[in-house]
Amino acid sequence: MQELPFSQASENNKQVILEILKRHLKDGDQVLELAGGTGQHAVHFATKLSNLHWQSSDIPSNVDSLNLRIAVAELANLPKAISIDVNHSPWCSYKPTAIFSANSLHIMSAGSVENFFKGAGELLQTDGTLAVYGPFKYAGEFTTASNKDFDYRLKDRDSMSGIRDFEWIKELAAQANLTFIEDNAMPANNQLLVWKKAK
Ligand SMILES: C[S@@+](CC[C@H](N)C(=O)[O-])C[C@H]1O[C@@H](n2cnc3c(N)ncnc32)[C@H](O)[C@@H]1O
């Protein structure tokens, strides 16, 4: 069998993320995952939340690799991932009641982050949930020295990437008609930010 893509970070954080998502997702939700990566989150959440529908996605060049794990899982509520690049709209015909993305905003360029929130605000249904997991800066400061090192390594690899300012993200979300609900401090110097789509 072909080796499945694997991320140790996803393995470590999937259960703690699930515990927060459980408070915000409900039976029957149609969840769109952006930047699905290895599919470990998609498979774990679709397995544990079997009464909702999980549609994962990634950029065209990553979607086949994402689908390796999704195909092996054979879950009725987890169809094959679709191609979505946040910079190309319309994203999809899927009408999500929730959108989730992990560890993507610090990988994308600043322009892509703007398109991420614009697209999420347009696509989400009223009262829909947006949940975003990853590291953030507050008032221009890294939360830890290790996040500062991580930011340095990210920029060394791709000067367009980097840990984003919470205040900027919050402003982008507000412009997209998304109401900030909560900021959950997570293990390993990460946050899980949650918004609701306003009427
Ligand atoms: C560090 S990985 C995170 C993957 C997974 N969500 C996780 O937590 O392990 C970053 C992801 O962002 C995706 N990505 C980068 N640019 C993107 C874009 N413009 N639109 C959508 N996804 C993008 C990459 O393909 C990759 O899957």
Image (cartoon, grey):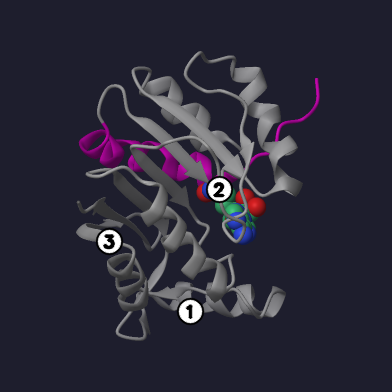
Q: Residue at x 27, y 61 (%)?
A: 177
Considering every residue shown, the one lying at the far right of the view is 2
Q: Is residue 57 above or below residue 151?
A: above
Classify mark 2 as within 8 Å of ligand 1 or not, answering yes or no. Answer: no
Looking at the image, tell me whether mark 1 or mark 2 is earlier in sequence order.
2
Which quadrant, please, contains the N terminus? Answer: top right
Q: Nearer the viewer, mark 1 or mark 2?
A: 2
Residue type of the residue flagged with mark 1: Lys
Percent across and percent down for residue 27 are 27, 22
Residue type of the residue flagged with mark 3: Asn
Q: Where does the magenta region start and end?
A: 1-25
Circle 1 residue: 148
Q: Residues within 10 Å of mark 3 (few under 14, many from 20)?
A: many
Which quadrant of the view contains residue 86? bottom right
Q: Residue at x 56, y 49 (%)?
A: 35
Q: Residue at x 66, y 21 (%)?
A: 71
Q: Residue at x 62, y 57 (%)?
A: 88
Looking at the image, tell me whether mark 3 or mark 2 is earlier in sequence order.
2
